[in-house]
């Protein structure tokens, strides 16, 4: 599979040749990759939202953030759960990732503990900063940030989000709405992203 095929959808994190070389399954098309990743993510979702994991794991801990990504993509990419080491068109510089992750997790824990924002807003603000500002992994950042936000929402006593009731893989109106809502949050307006998360 060529890197060009993986970079076709607007909003996708470009996958470089070195990252693409670490694809675990032998797949021929983008559709096969999407389906393979989907099955991997379903297993991770079951783990993340199980009562045992919710009770025993801390979603505000950096090791949890990496483990969740690893569980989502460990059957797909050898680099699953590992921060990127190449610059992308989205996110912070590589050398800033760890510091920014620590700051975001600390901020989110504070927001939750001090009820700075309602539970939905705590989770959605976390999602926005993780995917839009930091973008820590070579790929899968949006899906990871959405699932991590779901976990935070459930831990804070609400329900997981619907995220437009769509898987958000590939181009289409749902993905376009999500990207627009992220851009609005970049400009300081979190409301479209909050609305999208529950749409």
Image (tube, rainbow, N blue to C red):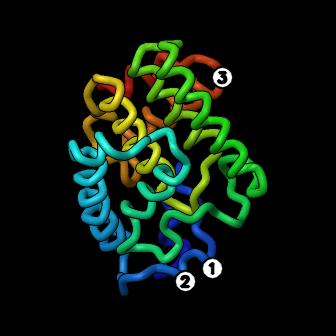
Residue marked by disc 1: 18
- How many numbered marks does the figure carry? 3
- The picture places residue 80, in percent across and down from the top left corner, at 48, 67
- The picture places residue 133, in percent across and down from the top left corner, at 65, 40
In the picture shown, does residue 115 fall above or below 93? above
In the picture shown, does residue 179 fall above or below 18? above
Q: Estimate how packed mark 1 is, as few (under 14), some (14 to 19) or many (20 or more) residues with alpha carbons within 10 Å.
A: few
Residue marked by disc 2: 21
Element at badge 1?
helix
In the picture shown, does residue 45 fall above or below 22? above
Q: Estimate how packed mark 3 is, as few (under 14), some (14 to 19) or many (20 or more) residues with alpha carbons within 10 Å.
A: few
Mark number for residue 187?
Answer: 3
Query: Camera-side residue: 28 or 107?
Result: 107
Residue 182 image-quadrant placement: top right
Q: Residue at x 24, y 47 (%)?
A: 52
Spatial CA span between label 3 and label 1: 33 Å
* Circles 1 and 2 in contact, beta carbons < 8 Å: yes
- The picture places residue 184, in percent across and down from the top left corner, at 57, 24
Q: Estimate how packed mark 2 is, as few (under 14), some (14 to 19) or many (20 or more) residues with alpha carbons within 10 Å.
A: some
């Amino acid at each position: 599979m060529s890197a060009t095929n993986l970079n076709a959808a607007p909003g996708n994190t470009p996958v470089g040749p070195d990252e693409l070389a670490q694809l675990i399954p032998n797949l021929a098309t983008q559709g096969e990759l999407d389906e393979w990743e989907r099955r991997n993510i379903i297993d991770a979702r079951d783990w993340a939202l199980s009562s045992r994991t919710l009770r025993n794991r801390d979603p505000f801990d950096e090791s949890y953030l990496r483990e969740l990504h690893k569980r989502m993509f460990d059957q797909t990419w050898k680099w699953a759960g590992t921060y990127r080491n190449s610059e992308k068109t989205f996110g912070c510089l590589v050398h800033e990732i760890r510091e920014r992750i620590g700051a975001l997790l600390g901020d989110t824990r504070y927001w939750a503990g001090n009820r700075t924002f309602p539970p939905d807003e705590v989770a959605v603000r976390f999602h926005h900063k993780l995917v839009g500002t930091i973008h820590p992994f070579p790929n899968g950042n949006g899906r990871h940030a959405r699932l991590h936000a779901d976990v935070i929402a459930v831990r804070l006593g609400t329900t997981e989000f619907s995220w437009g009731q769509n898987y958000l893989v590939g181009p289409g109106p749902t993905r376009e709405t999500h990207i627009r809502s992220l851009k609005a949050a970049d400009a300081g307006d979190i409301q479209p992203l909050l609305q999208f998360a529950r749409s």
